[in-house]
Image: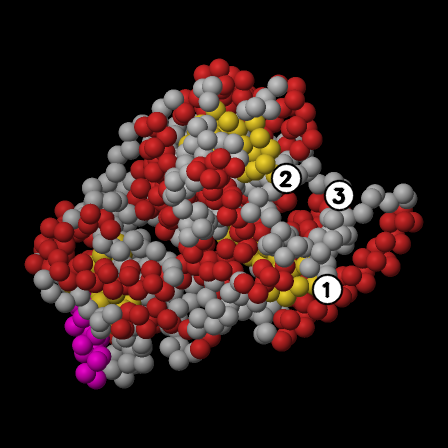
Amino acid sequence: MENFDSHIIRGFLSVLSTTWKRGHLTNLLFHKVPPCKDPLVHEELCLDEFSCILDFLQEHTKLLQLSEAIDILARGGKLPNRAVCLTFDDGYVEWSDYLAPLLRARNVPATFFITTEPLGGVPLWHERIVAGVRALPDHGVRLPYGLNGYDDITSPDLRLELICKLQALMKYATLSERRSIIDLIESQAADRIIHSRTIGASTVRELHSHGFEIGSHTIHHPILNKCSDKEALAEIAGSREELSEMVRGEISLFAYPNGIPGKDFCSRHVQMVRSSGYKAAVVSTGGVVSMTSDMFQLPRTTLWGKNQRRMAYHLARNFFTRETKLSIQAAKDSIPMDNVRCLLVASTFPPIHGGSAVVYENLCAHMPPGTIRVLTAKNNYLTHSQVPGWKEHDEAVGFPVDRLPYLRPLMLPPPANILVSMYRFIFQDMFLYLRILISAASIVRLHKINIVCIGELVAGSWLGLALRKLLKCKFVIYVHGEEVTTAASGRLYGNCRRYYLHSADKVIAVSSFTCNALVQEMGLPRESIALVPNGVDTERFLLGMPNDEFLIRHELSGKRIILTIGRLVPRKGMDMAIRAMPKIIRKIPDVHYVIVGDGGYRSQLEQIIHEQELWKYVTLVGKVTDKDLVCFLQACDLFIMPNRTMPDGDTEGFGLVFREANACGKPVVGGRAGGAVEAVIDGETGLLVDGYSPDEIADAVVHLLENKELMQQMGENGLRIAHENNTRSVAERFYKICEMLLI
């Protein structure tokens, strides 16, 4: 019966092969092939299973080297009947230990596409996740946003499920996001993390010396569509250079990471591969290679099957699978740099002060020219007065700013009754909304806007949704945190938030904390969210020596300066920092606490200062110029903002000011709440404290001020991290998200 099946299979595959004039080629894709199965690795082929596949292929197909098959097609020759190539992706030491001896013993050719980062001893990112989860404690694990239900991972099945979800989350993350998630998992290990041995340069040379073909698979295995053009080219060309030098020969083949055309890479990356000197490249979608195939998008398929008939069915089905490939000439795939045309809509925008205003201005300043413009207001809806200096500001920036009188209804006293409320809505608010919509639609049409980004969830999302429905532009919401975590003041308000978020094409979140709130509080799917951490303007916030004239002017000469910068609101924790001062003063008599900013909580802070008799040690400066703000950061010894979560859920979404202080080389103290736990890396760039505890705040401040070496080390760490997460990198990330929305 077995012999009869073999004749039938060979005959059937031969008939399918003859339908191509010059033959066809089936590329098969494999990965690690370890000697035995790992219970925490999903659907991994072990060596025995691969041997069965190899038995089948040797009996029913003609196995070729990939470059040999490509050369036959390139010169117009005819491929052998039932031609098949074996390819292996990523890079594993098991290849040389087990797989290569098996292939050599059977005289089977193969091509190995290698990711070069592991050659330096760093395990592949998905292998690090397996090792990290294996070492996690059974209970109490902190996980990235959107991953709930793993409070108990005592069973191997739950750990396997967690690994699969983490790998799915990380596959389409940026390299920096991957590193953050891996660091989070590894930092919680209860047992020693045991990583798999990594492939080395000697292994690559050994495979090459035995006649196996070496191809490139980038340096870090990113999704190319998640990289900037500069990063993508470095990944594509850099790995080729490393491998060429290693084997002292030409590397002519490339494999796209993950490899789904359009989803994982675009035609711009195909052009990069071509220009980097490769002769051909493979993707990871089904179909067979024929004379009409693009040599830089050769299809591959994965062969699974427990028996010969099942494997034969998979091969036969692949004959009828249509190739997925990108058209290199299609302008829509290439996405030229001026194709993104984004309108950012935000009432809170400079010269108005505020964390979100700074984020938006820095974002616009570093976007490519012509890709973004701003729609904001001339007047402040809170004070009903004109925003001071808006004309001068708009003339000085390097991007276009359009202003309307208002972008939201005025803040008025609560209506006396429902009739007053209805009157305001019908005769005031409705006309305002109509004027805003008409003006915004005119801007979208005139400037061919294709993405509308709303900077205020509840007050502005109606406009983004309306413009998407009327003019077919993409709708993005930028979320900072407190607008999601703060308790809704009514059912309508809460339902509006949820409706807008679920209607958006993409939601930008500034921290993992905010991402988690969007998933848990608003039920938003994880794939709808893009994490774009706030970045620091490192061209403005710099290392600098305290200015003597500045210190004298503010009566700070000879003082140890603790500094807080922020809007005077309860969640910032300035009140608890003031209450911590008596304990700090007893240890450090020359200390002085400076609070920069203004807000509705000022009178309460003044009352605490008076009650504690601290007027000689605490100064409320109020608003300052941009220049003086940087001077305060350069002059201080320590930055502090012991933020906390308020009873209504109001909390800090990220805390950009911590990173701004880091950029000036200062250690920081933040509250263990909200997104500050990401902005302040506890023990590395500063310390986290309970924002409700004056004693804990005082102890942290004293500990740092009495330990100059620790302060210096934290300042240096913070400076490095601030430069790694600057405003330019944020703009690149945002631009890439916009690009992906337009594909």
The image shows residue 150, relative to residue 285, as above or below, that is: above
Seen in the picture, residue 534 relative to 378 is either above or below; the reply is above
Tell me where residue 693 appears, x and y as whole percent: 55, 21
Applied colour scheme: secondary structure
Q: Quick check: marks 3 and 1 in contact, CB under 8 Å?
A: no
Secondary structure category for the residue under label 3: helix
Q: Residue at x 53, y 51 (%)?
A: 359
533 part of magenta stretch: no
Q: Which mark is residue 105?
A: none
Taking the spot 44% from the left edge, 71% from the top edge, the residue there is 337
Q: Earlier in the sequence, mark 3 or mark 2?
A: 3
In this view, the mark in front (3 or 2): 2
- In depth, the one of 740 and 359 nearer the eye is 359
Instruction: Work out whether residue 504 can be spotted.
Output: no
Which amino acid lies under the numbered mark 1 shown in the image of this protein?
Ile
Residue at the spot of label 3: 491
Identified at 38% across, 43% down, the residue is 543
Q: Quadrant of residue 52?
A: bottom left
Residues marked 2 and 1 touching at CB (< 8 Å): no
Q: Position of residue 276 (x, y in %)?
A: 25, 70
Amino acid beneath label 3: Arg
Question: Is residue 444 rendered to the left or right of residue 237?
Answer: right
Label 1 belongs to which residue?
A: 436
* Residue 216 image point, x, y percent: 23, 61
Mark 2 or mark 1, which has the lower sequence index?
1
Marker disc for residue 598: 2
* Dot 2 crowding, Cα within 10 Å, few <14, some 14–19, many 20+: some
Distance from Cα at disc 3 to Cα at disc 2: 32 Å
Q: Which region of the structure is painted magenta?
A: 62-81
* In the image: residue 202, left or right of residue 163: left
User: Which of pointers 3 and 1 lies earlier in the amino acid sequence?
Assistant: 1
Residue 561 lies left or right of residue 41; in this view the side is right
